[in-house]
Amino acid sequence: MGERQRKLHGIMICVPYQGHLNPFVDLALKLASNGIVITFVHLEFLHRKLCQTHHANKTDVDLFSEARELGLDIRFTTMTDPFPLEFDRDANFNEYWETMVRDFPPLVNEFVGKILASDRDNMLHFLVADTVYTWPAAVARKYNLVNVSLWTQSALVYCLGYHWDLLQQNGHFPCNDEVDEEIKYIPGIESINTKDLIAYLRQSQCESVISRASRLQFEQGKMADFVLQNTVEELEPRALSALNNYLPNYAIGPLNFSQDLPTNTVTTSLWSKSDCTNWLGSKPPGSVLYVSFGSFVHTNMQVLEELAYGLLLSQVNFVWVIRQGILGDGATSVLSAEFQDAVKERGLIIGWCDQVETLSNPAVGGFLTHSGWNSTLESMWCGVPMICYPIGFDQPCSSKLVVSDWKIGVHLCEGGTLHRENVAHKIQSFMNGGDLERLKQNAERVRKIMKNAVETDGSSKTNFDRFLKDLEAKIRAQN
Ligand code: UDX
């Protein structure tokens, strides 16, 4: 078959966390819905976790079989990372990433080489890798693949990371943890306070593996042919337009709410979900605070206790997701029976849920979140105002966007230690106070912007179509 008739074929390799996996799968479905062949790669341990959660440990499950029945050509495969399957990657985060940065690149290199060697007819044309990996540029170059980078965080964070050297020249990397000043020299960022910077730019974290790996990652990201941003043009116009001066960027978010996606065809949830519908159905509209800290940050017992008793004192209804492993030690039950008893009617504590379904429930009036980017987008999509309690990584930046730029949320505290009385007061005034109407109106405005973006002729849809054209042109030119 001549090159012109051959379908485009991409290989997608994502990072093994829920907050990265979700947008990756959505992008795979979106590309395949547009006639592109996809080879989707999970790390073996993640595949096993999904099989354990959803398929009674059967490991020969093809996670994309239903999608293929719908006519989408997505081939599923797995590869190993440098650790044995039983290694606890969650509890040993630093060790895991030290090794991943050092030893994973040669494994991917070899893996992609084997895929190419075994499938001559369906030659690969492009690679879609998570921007947080450090190896995509080298692998794409070696195998003559177009290098597509998927960035699963805000464009604001990308801007900061892109200008890491500039931050260093201005004394903001490493950024003294005590400094409180406005940064106004980064192209695309009107102003950001040092306390809202990405956590790994701080002095206390600048030697961490994530800080070192992220710097490498942003450097190698500059060699990408295309960067896909899971954000919305109208919400981050300055950052995106500044980045366009250096890289071809396409704001195509929120990916999980794209119009052309088949729903519920691929299993992605890493934990089994509890259904809160009945419980929520017994509560008045807007009366429940949904509380969740995403899929991978850890916290400590003191924070959980202050939050727990803050929730108790606030008298507000709540659903609280406390996922197994949140303390980083595999503990399954972290709150005392006494507390659980005291909040029996008012509070539902679960291990995991369908977050979008929960946020869409009319009983939910607010979201106390760690400000993970996916959670932020999902809350915005549902028009739910947020109380932000960023724990690390990119989360302070998302909460700055929510509180200062879009005015659809408030901070739980201005740094420092949590106290239950302050938590209770903040929750009470957020759920019942005078500011709620203003927050709700702003949240409704943002919700409409997002809905419009994914409609035909909306910015995200148009940007995605433009990306497909540019991708095809680049592949034709390169082959
Ligand atoms: C992390 C970072 O915090 C985030 O900013 C980055 O972009 C991706 O990596 P995470 O901490 O897990 O992600 O948070 P978040 O980005 O919010 O992703 C969590 C995902 O888990 C969301 O899509 C959410 O819907 C899902 N989730 C969470 C559930 O499905 N059920 C739950 O009970 C809780």
Image (cartoon, helix red, strand yellow):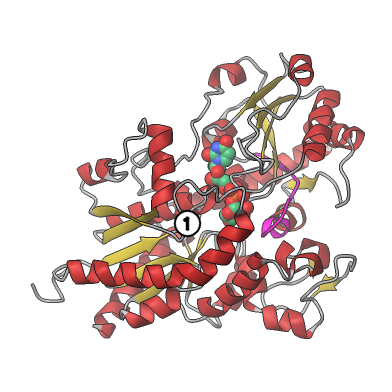
Q: Nearer the viewer, residue 22 or 251?
A: 22
Q: Residues within 10 Å of mark 1 (few under 14, many from 20)?
A: some
On the image, the x and y values in percent for residue 268 come to: 43, 43
Residue topped by disc 1: 83
Q: Is residue 173 left or right of residue 180?
A: left
Q: Which residues, given as a range, are shown in magenta?
A: 384-397
Would residue 427 be visible to someone looking at this image?
no
Q: Quadrant of the C terminus?
A: bottom left
Q: Is residue 61 left or right of residue 188?
A: left
Amino acid type of the residue that numbered disc 1 sits on in the rendered structure: Phe
On the image, the x and y values in percent for residue 81 come to: 43, 59
Q: How many marks?
A: 1
Q: From this view, report whether residue 328 is shown above or below residue 30.
A: above
On the image, the x and y values in percent for residue 172 come to: 80, 76
Residue at 44% over, 41% down: 49
Asked if the magenta segment contains residue 393, the reply would be yes
Residue at 62% over, 14% down: 282
**Residue 404 sits in which quadrant?**
bottom right
Q: From this view, report whether residue 421 is shown above or below residue 85.
A: above
Asked if the magenta segment contains residue 304, the reply would be no
Residue at 67% over, 19% down: 284
Q: Nearer the viewer, residue 360 or 348?
A: 348
Q: Quadrant of the N terminus?
A: bottom left
**Residue 476 sits in which quadrant?**
bottom left
